[in-house]
Image (tube, helix red, strand yellow):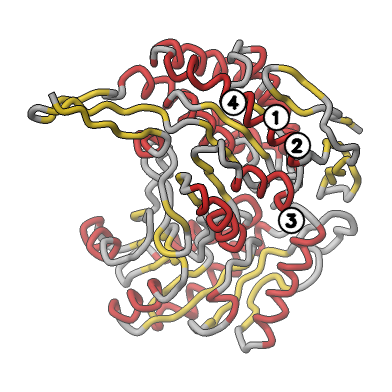
Amino acid sequence: MTAYDTIYIDGVWTPSSGTSVIEVVDPATERVHATVPQGTSEDVDRAVAAARRAFPAWAATPPAERAAHLAKVRDLLAERAAEMAEAVVRDLGAPAPLAQRVHVGLPIGVLGSYVRLAEEFAWEERIANSLVVREPVGVVGAITPWNYPLHQITNKVGPALAAGCTVVLKPSEVAPTAAYLFLEILDAAGIPAGVVNLVSGTGPVVGEAIAAHPDVDMVSFTGSTRAGTRVAELAAPTVKRVALELGGKSANVILPGADLEKAVRAGVNGAYLNSGQTCSALTRMLVHRDDHARAVEIAAEAAAALDGKIGPMVSAVQYERVQGYITRGVDEGATLVAGGSGRPDGVETGYYVRPTVFGDVTPEMTVAREEIFGPVLSVMAYADEADAERIANDTDYGLSGAVWAGTQEEALAFARRLRTGQVEINGGAFNPLAPFGGYKKSGNGRELGRYGLEEYLEVKSMQL
């Protein structure tokens, strides 16, 4: 077992002011594999003060120098990629290939994108008699989730540092070890003292202290809509900037004329990525009523092929939550066509859930409305395109979606009518340079690429 017994403040690994620790459980074995300090509000005060002291010098550092620092971080992360992937496997239970390709490979690419943006971004522009300049917002509180523990850190720390901000980071207490390794990398890369600080701990203590702190200029939060609402409430009295990337209940709309077999199989993979623990997961599959029976058959086959091959839920709490939704789906009249309650056959240890598909799901059912965050797919029938549009948009969320059609033009036309932050067109690949974020209760603000960088910038206009 690994015992992390310090937090990182002002360039130094230092003890927490508290004495309690948080146990980190390997969800595949159900055994504690690490401990981290349970930080306090006093620790947050120290970290924010360090970030505030470091801000003027870091903000004044030329963008090219900030880019060089980020390049060093990217390169060191690439060197330690195997070690980082193992940390994600232990914390999250992610299969090793997924940990290597997505959980670590994607953050390396994201950091590289901010190296280029810091070098190329138009920090100033002339508009008639005005000089418009973009300046760092200040001290950023970054509160990150457990489902993509490194990716969500780089999504915030990368643009914040490129912009000239300083950071106080609180990783999820459920999966914190990748954050510790990342701070080791930042330290080895020579990031100046106080520019990035880490306080491990719980949301109700450390997270709330960061969100409410008067010397934090911006808080960037990724997590549940319920928790994001609380962050916004705490941040409101100080009128700090708030960026929220929250939940989703994304629709995968398969129009008549699409390649049904390809679309359904891709949709199953999209729903089950990271064991379904993905905010943008395509958990509602909408098919024409004439195709419903065949779509359910294909989805059931695809789900059965993944049984025993996806990772576990991150915790016992999440396992029980997903089991409860499966039971409720059956109770409310959905047709269980694959998976179901309990662990996969032959699995006795670990928080594994059987890849589950429900057919005959109607829009008012709980499994069609609430974010489950597990490998549970709802297949829903629609009568015509207008009905598909209505069902797809009939949700509190608007984070992601997908459209499959016989032509790209047809799919694009339908995608324009979806109230959601991003849409995959006929299986279009995820683009880490494009903005990521949601409509409605999926949050506000955007991450990734130029749009992600601009979240961390103030705009000043000087009339000449």
Q: Are marks 2 and 4 in contact (CB under 8 Å)?
A: no
Q: Determine which residue is flagged by label 3.
A: 313
At x 70%, y 50%, the residue is 203
Q: Which amino acid is tagged 1? A: Arg
Number of callouts? 4
The residue most toward the left is: 128
Q: Determine which residue is flagged by label 1.
A: 46
Q: Are marks 1 and 4 in contact (CB under 8 Å)?
A: no
Specify whether 45 is left or right of 151: right
Q: Position of residue 169 (x, y in %)?
A: 63, 35
Instruction: Choose mark 3 or mark 2, whichever is in front.
Output: 2
At x 35%, y 17%, the residue is 119
Q: Are marks 1 and 2 in contact (CB under 8 Å)?
A: yes
Cα–Cα span, label 1 and label 2 = 6 Å
Q: Determine which residue is flagged by label 2.
A: 42
At x 65%, y 79%, the residue is 336
User: Of the residues under marks 3 and 4, which one precedes in the sequence?
Assistant: 4
Instruction: Choose mark 3 or mark 4, whichever is in front.
Output: 4
**Image position of 451 with respect to 293: above or below:** above
Circle 2 residues within 10 Å: few <14, some 14–19, many ≥20 = some
Q: Which amino acid is tagged 3? A: Met
Q: Determine which residue is flagged by label 4.
A: 51
At x 67%, y 45%, the residue is 209
User: Of the residues under marks 1 and 4, which one precedes in the sequence?
Assistant: 1
Residue 49: quadrant of the picture: top right
The answer to whether any part of residue 11 appears in the image is yes
Helix, strand or loop at disc 1? helix
**Image position of 77 with respect to 345: above or below:** above
